[in-house]
Image (tube, coloured by chain):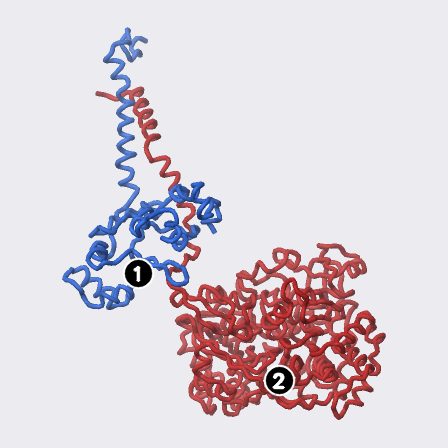
Chain colours: A blue, B red
Amino acid sequence: MADRHLHPANGNSASGQFGGAAPFFVGLVVALILGWWAFPQMLYSQKHQPIRFSHKVHMEGAGMECSSCHFLREDGTFAGLPTTESCAECHSEPMGSDPEEVRFIEEYVNTGKEVEWLVYQKQPDNVFFSHAAHSMDSCNKCHEFTETELCSSCHPNVAETDEAPVYYENKLTKYSKQTMKMWRCEECHAHPEHYGTTRSSNACYVCHK
Amino acid sequence: MAVDRRGFLKFVAGVSAGVMVTPIPWKLLDDASIWTQNWPWIPSNVDGASTYVSTVSKLCPSCVGMKVRLVGDRPVRILPDENHPLSKGGISPLAVAEAQMLHSPARVMRPLKKAADGAYVAISWEEADAMLAEKLGAAKGGIACVSGDETGTINEVLSAIAVQAGSGNFYLMPTEAQPAAKAVAAMGGKGQLGYDIENSDYVLAIGANVLETWGTVIRNRAAYKAARPHGEEPAVQYVFAGPVQNSTAAGADQWVPIKAGTEGVFALGIAHLLIKAGARADAADFDAFRSLVEAYNPAKVAEITGTNPEQLKSVAGALMKARTPLVITGSDFGQGTGAATVMAGVAVNMLLGGMNRKGGLKLLPVAEPVVSSAMTRAEMMGKDFVSYMSRINAGKEKAPAAMVFYEANPAYALPQATKMSEVLAKVPFKATFTTFLDETAMLCDLVLPVPMGLERLDDVATPYGSGQALYCLARPVAPMPANVKPAGDYIIALAGKLGCSLGVSSWEEVLQAKAQAMGADWDSLMDGNVFMSDATVSASLSFGADALAKSVAPKAKEGDFAVAPVFKLGIGTAKTAIPPYNNKLIRRWELQGNELYVAMNGATARKLGVLMHDKIVVSNKSGNLTARVNIFEGIMNDTIAVLMGLGHTAFDQFSKGKGENVMQLLTVGFEAGTGLSVWNMAGVTISKA
């Protein structure tokens, strides 16, 4: 039966103790690498916007603001992304020499097709989010946000980028990686001071209709 | 280094411990929960700017004006239109469902032909055109047309075809407008009855369910609302007389329970008391009328109608005291009443000096036809479809060689519905222009899809019940499905193929001519405005005492109990089944699963020896239905209230097979004085199932 002893008879050598724990630590490290590095790679697929769009050119070059394109309509609804028609107000003809602009005009403006922009923070239909309620007027009662600061407190700040960020799509949920989760909303909605000023409570039906 | 069993287990333990401090289990759990909420089969919100277009409902018989909210070219919501005189900030439960009904599973999306085995097969429009032209061409001289659109000029086109290619057999589906027109004709008048509810200070509705279904009901409700501001004394008194405490009775200051079908007698009882109090009217046959109503003293009226004589006297007294009283007579369920009921109501208005008076009864002008050889409105109203069907059934008239239906569903919506389907089966060729695959479509050889009112150009000319002559357009606000064709232009082209000369070349030309005939400005109409006219025609009416005397006495009904059909707009009409959106309007004890509930009061239930939820069979010689009992005290003794709009055998899963069709029990009789078909007094026997 002696051959069934897997350890030396004394069983207390330092090397023996270390060697005995090694498989555990190897497994731990493998899991950590898998979980923190490989898993995100596997979970998200990378997508790019159909047209390379430079916010920087529009903000710095043309002196526009976020709300020049992403504005609130007269009835209080949010326009979201501009339509091809509104882009064509300036880009009916190429304004520069960028081949992407030429492609945009040929493929979209001339055909009247809408660009299927990838929205980094599209909320599901059961979330009723009103941009009108989160406007400069309401937030700047207490804060002193610039428009870019206010927008980028939820959205990625693309104002100074020449290239739109990569869009990471969750293969399981089909939502963008940057989609805001509820805890982010609650940073303000569950904050007692916000409730005191805005009366926007953290109750379910404030957002979920 | 070889991995032994213990080493492997340690490795697994390490992986397990490591995994727990990585996002894998937590993120996957979270994502899986989100994934379970991704339901691709439910529609998504539509993004885009909202636009609003004013139009009018062609689906709702109230012809309510509505504002359609569009995102892009997609209607997403129907809203009230404050500027439309038939909406005034209100909307009907049928019109509000129209945006959803564009996507109804019961919609016909392409032409269908009945194959030899009875199945419907999709065909091309070319094949449908050829089949229709061939069959109608062969049936020339024997084509009958039936329309379910009471207010549209399409009736002129259809009647012109019936006159030129048939034998003048054009019919409208029965509504309250026909007995009213018959009454005006019998009283020697011209034009269409109009009811100035807005300017009345006392409204007595006898049978007419003015706050729920009757006439231009949304406009009626707006007048009611305006005259009765919350928290203030009502400026107008409303009194309702009818067998069921419906929404009008609930809104009225007083409900006078009377038996179903005795509305005319109740009105004559009022006339008796008015004349006794000295009321007169400048009519040639006033003396004859006075002799007629002499017999209708409160005691006799109470005996026939089941009302309380004191309540009758109190209502007559209040009418005499009112400055601008208005009496409206009609049917509880929007059809089947006799001309005598309307004549008796008009007579009371005449005694009250209410003819062509502000807040009274008016005679509104009717425009002449704009299509060559089309019937006039009076001629259309004089044609009685139920009577025609009865004559065919009795062999007194030959069935037409072909019948064309336009937005009409007689196989479901006529009285004695099953019998009517049997009569329709005698017609060799039937074609229908319809939006929905209804019961009549299921009897037709050819089914031709037409767009909904939101998708087509159409018109509304002075709906019955309106207080003024009016004209407005339904404008196409949404694109129609690819294989659906507007009926107007199609039927005009068809008429050409049949050799008919209509004097018009397009549907828009017809509507422009109609607008001109009404005195309206086309451009203004196309901007969504409504043409209205205060004009009236001469109201020197007689009482029609002879016809009234022959017609008003109610006939003895079969069985010991009466049926009072309950009509609610939201549950559907003769034209359409319940919109899926409106299923929630059906109350708990009106329908359970597929089982119908009928309501009766406690006294009736005791007489029958039944309790709530007991199963009963309601029958007469026309048909029978099985239902369960609901007890509701707001019903006359010996009367059962049955919800209309159920018991469809076609349409979609939201209406098919649910409950039973009360029309099966409504037996057709004929009014002696006018010959008009009536079915507002159905007697039944009731037994436990």
Q: Give residue B192's mark.
A: 2
* Image label count: 2
- Picture coordinates of residue A65, whole percent (x, y): 27, 56
Viewed as shown, does residue B602 lie left or right of B571? right
Viewed as shown, does residue B450 lie left or right of B211? left
Q: Quadrant of residue A107?
A: bottom left
In the depicted view, which residue is nearer to us: B623 or A116? Answer: A116
Q: Callout 1, which amino acid?
A: Pro
Q: What residue is rendered at 54% in x and 71% in y?
A: B442
- Picture coordinates of residue B331, whole percent (x, y): 68, 74
Question: Alpha carbon of mark 2 to alpha carbon of mark 1: how far?
Answer: 53 Å
In the depicted view, which residue is nearer to us: B339 or B128? Answer: B339
Q: Give residue B124's mark.
A: none
Q: What residue is rendered at 77% in x and 73% in y?
A: B315
Q: Quadrant of residue B456?
A: bottom left
Disc 2 chain ID = B
Residue occupying the far top of the picture: A10
Q: What residue is rendered at 76% in x and 70% in y?
A: B258
Disc 1 chain ID = A
| Residue B280 seen from this side | yes
Q: Circle 2 — which element?
A: strand
Above or below residue A29? Residue B227 is below
Q: Callout 2, which amino acid?
A: Gln
Task: Residue under label 1, please give it.
Answer: A82
Q: Circle 1 — which element?
A: loop
- Picture coordinates of residue B177, whole percent (x, y): 63, 80
- Picture coordinates of residue B41, whole percent (x, y): 43, 55
Check the picture and name the quadrant holding the N terminus of chain A: top left
